[in-house]
Image (cartoon, grey):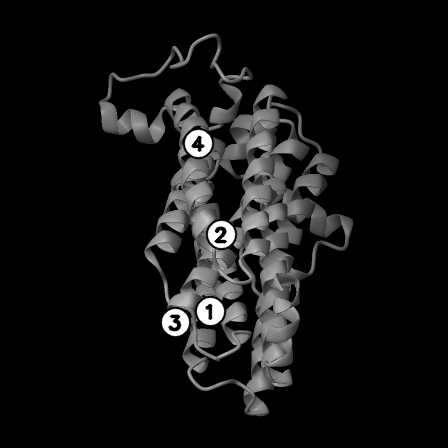
Amino acid sequence: MDSFAPAITLARTPVRTRSLSNLLFAVAALVFAMVIVGGITRLTESGLSITQWNLVSGAIPPLTHADWQHAFGLYRQTPQYREVAGPAGMTLAGFKFIFFWEWVHRLLGRILGLVFFVGIGWFAVRRAIPKGYGWRLAALFVLGGLQGAVGWFMVMSGLEGRTEVSPYRLSAHLLFALFLFAALIWTALDLRNRDGRPAQPTGWGALALATLAIQVMLGAWVAGFRAGYVSNSWPDMNGRFLPDGIDWSRGVGFAFTHDPYLLHFMHRWWAWVVVAVLVLFARQVKRLEGGRAATIAIHSAFGTQILLGILTVVSGVAIWLAVAHQATAALLVAATAWGAHELGSRRA
C-alpha cells in the first residue's frame, strides 16, 4: 500500500499546484548545486578571487587578456594574495582556476534568483498560487536574497585584513543556504498534501533539525579554522581520545569556538548524538502511513555521511571526499525535512 501513496497524492493534487511544487523542487535542486560548488570554492581557496559584487555585469567573466589582468590586479591587492598566494607563486593561470569556481558559484545564485522570480511571477499572473501561499513564496524569495547578502558579507571579511573569510560568517552562509533548502522542500511538500493543509512543526521534527543544524555549524567552523587537518586518524585523534594541543589558556568559551583541535573533536562526536536522535526520529516517521520511504532516506543519508566524514579525515581532507561530505550533509537535511514534514502532516 505504501508504494502507491505518492501516486495517490499526485492524483489528488491539482495540476497547477503540482507544477508550482515542481518549480520549488527545481529551485531546491539549484540550492543543492550551489552548496556543492560552494564546498569546492572553499576547499580550493577560491572565494576571494572576485573582489567586487556587480549583480548584472558580474555575470560576464573577463573576456580579454586585459580584462583578466585587471581582475588579477584587484586580487593581488588582497591580504590573501600578499601573504599566501603571492609568496606561493600564483600565476595568471592559477588565478583563472580559482576565479572560475567563484564565478560559477555566483552565477548559480543569479540563475536561482531568476528562475524563482520568473517562475513565481508566471504563476502569480495566471492566478495559480493557492490561497495562503503568497506570503510564504515572498518570504522564500526574501530569504534567497538574504542568502546572497550574507555571502557577500562573508567575502568582505576576507578582504579586510584577513587571508581567509571569517569562519563564523562562513557558517552563517551555509546555514542560511540549508535553511532555504529545507524551507523550499517543506513548502513544495505542503503543496502536495492530499487535504491541502500545511504541515505543522512537531517536537520530534524540531529536535532532529536543531541537532543537525548544530552539526552543520560545527562542520563549517571546522572548515573555516582548517581543523580537519589537525588529525588524520580515527576514531582516536593522533593516538588519543581527547587530543593534545587544545589551548585552554584563553578560557573555555574561546576554546569551544576557536580551537581547531577541540572543534574537530566536537564535530566528530556530536555526529553520534545526531545519529541517535535521527534513529529515534526515523522510528516515529516509520509508524506513519507512507513514512517508510522518508525513513529509508534518513538512514541512508546519515550512514553515508558518517562514512564520508571518516574517509575525509583519514585521507587528510581529500577535496573530492570533503565535497561529497558536504553534499551528503545537504541530502541529510533534505531527508530530515521530509521526515519532519511527514510527522507535521499527520499533526495537521
Q: Residue furthest front?
A: 1
Mark 3 and mark 4 lie on one chain; the one further toward the N terminus is: 4
Helix or strand or loop: what does disc 3 sit on? loop
**Which residue carries the number 4 mark?**
272
**Which residue carries the number 3 mark?**
348
Which mark is nearer the camera, 3 or 1?
Answer: 3
Q: Which amino acid lies under the numbered mark 4 shown in the image of this protein?
A: Trp
Which mark is nearer the camera, 3 or 4?
Answer: 3
Mark 3 and mark 2 lie on one chain; the one further toward the N terminus is: 2
**Which residue carries the number 1 mark?**
140
> Which x, y percent locates residue 183?
47, 63
- The residue lying at 42 percent from left, 37 percent from top is 276
Q: Is residue 154 left or right of residue 25?
A: left
**Which residue carries the number 2 mark?**
336
> Which x, y percent locates residue 313?
56, 23
Between 14 and 281, the one nearer to me in the picture: 281
Q: Which amino acid lies under the numbered mark 3 shown in the image of this protein?
A: Ala
